[in-house]
Amino acid sequence: MMNAAYREWEFGVMERYLRDREEEPIDFYLKDECDCRSCCRCHNQYYADNDFIIVYLEDIIEQEDNKGYRLLLDFFSFSDYTRFTEVVKGVSKDNDERNDWKDKYLPRSTFFIIENYRATDKPERKKYYYLNLWMLRNTELKREHEGYNGFPVLGSISLTDAQENNKNKNATLLYLTMPLAYPQWVFSSLQYNVAYNGLADVEINRLKVWNVGQGNYNELMTDDSPYLIYDAGTDVFSKGGVAAHKGDLEGELKNGLPLLVVSHWHADHYSLLFALENKDLMRVQVYMFPSYVKNLSVFLFVARLNLIGATVDMRKLPFTSKWESLGFKNFTLFSNKYVSSNVNDSGLTLFVKGANGNAMLPGDCKYTIAEGETNEAVEKMGAQNRDICLVIPHHGGKAGKCVTYNVPAAKTIEGIVSVGKENGYGHPNGEVMKQIKTYVPKVRLTKDCGDIDVWL
């Protein structure tokens, strides 16, 4: 359905936009002529039917009173976004009213919300779909100037009963498509060896797991100062959501932060970053991200950091998982192998050797992977016969096979589950938690205990 030659050209445009620091809007880069010769269409005209674009379904919840589903969607690329702006009313391209002058050159995010979506089969999260623009003609995007629960979005579209009745009975709004991802070479200009030896090699003595609901936000502390933040996200759909925890992150960044790591690109692990102003983003000395990206908003966020002059280390994921030494004696990084069909397993895991104990932060990767990584890290770091704290992967959900947490070199094991009281994922999974508690003597959940501090 896609013209492959056009898509290759478009990624080249996106790479140049990411690399350049010229203060030009996105549209400037899309003016280039397509010179791929094999492409008989140019710019947005690369589908067999121009009324379809590719979108990424980040999240979905069931609405009250049987109104259907609420969808959180984003675009795959620039052309999907620009085609959407041509068809749907109310998507202003004039950003001059924004306070932050950099916002004139790219939107804060291109996420948008569809309300009252009805379907026989519930769409799946973290999947790509063709979006039928024909069904959205003459609809209007309601602008969300304050964001949705504090999370920046373009706006929302409500599929009213009248619009539903007027639709072609044979038409569908979303059609499932193939797994897609940006090629890792798009970020090649940001794949360089950051001088981590310029950061102080401190002794980490505390792990703080913030109670952010259905999300993940962890800090590694030296005394009372945050040294490294691993993930900074919360549930976009929860009441309060990003707005409730944005101030916490801003406060922790007030005096600067040496390093911030995002395990993988799911919104519940990075959503708080999108709410920050540039002045706060610049307080982080080094950002480390996996280069496996799924949607346009994340690409634009990385582009924003590049435009404002932040130091970004986009880690190209290997085809075979491996440990990567960053020159620190107290923590090390594990790059999970590139798995094109699974973002959870394609990311960055962190092992920390504290003053007296260890900590393992695996993001959302499968339990079986996290277990193997922990054993390898204990040996690699010379951290045997110490207590170990594991932030349980995937919020206690059923991510692959149940874990045994067989860490023979650990004295005792403590598990922490970062999970929200109400979430559409069914986390934590009862069977999984029963299995975990068989091997982990002490398990605490943020939804029950609030913020959790562990001395390392």
Image (spheres, helix red, strand yellow):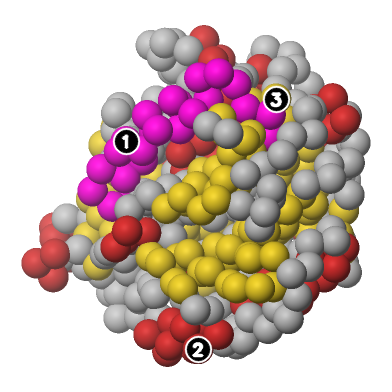
Quarter where residue 241 is shown? top left
Tag 3's secondary structure?
Answer: strand
Q: Residue tagged by mark 2?
A: 438
Q: State yes or no: discs 3 and 1 in contact (Cβ < 8 Å).
A: no
Tag 1's secondary structure?
Answer: helix
Side of 76 where 192 appears, left or right: right
Find the magenta span and give its range: 237-259
Tell me if residue 130 comes above or below residue 140 in the rendering: below
Residue 114 is one of the magenta-drawn residues: no
Q: Nearer the viewer, residue 13 or 331?
A: 331
Tell me if residue 211 comes above or below residue 192 in the rendering: below
Q: Residue tagged by mark 3?
A: 285
Side of 145 where 47 appears, left or right: right
Q: Residue at x 62, y 35 (%)?
A: 222
Can residue 273 be seen in the rendering of this structure? yes
Quarter where residue 347 is shown? bottom right
Q: CA distance from mark 1 to mark 2?
A: 37 Å
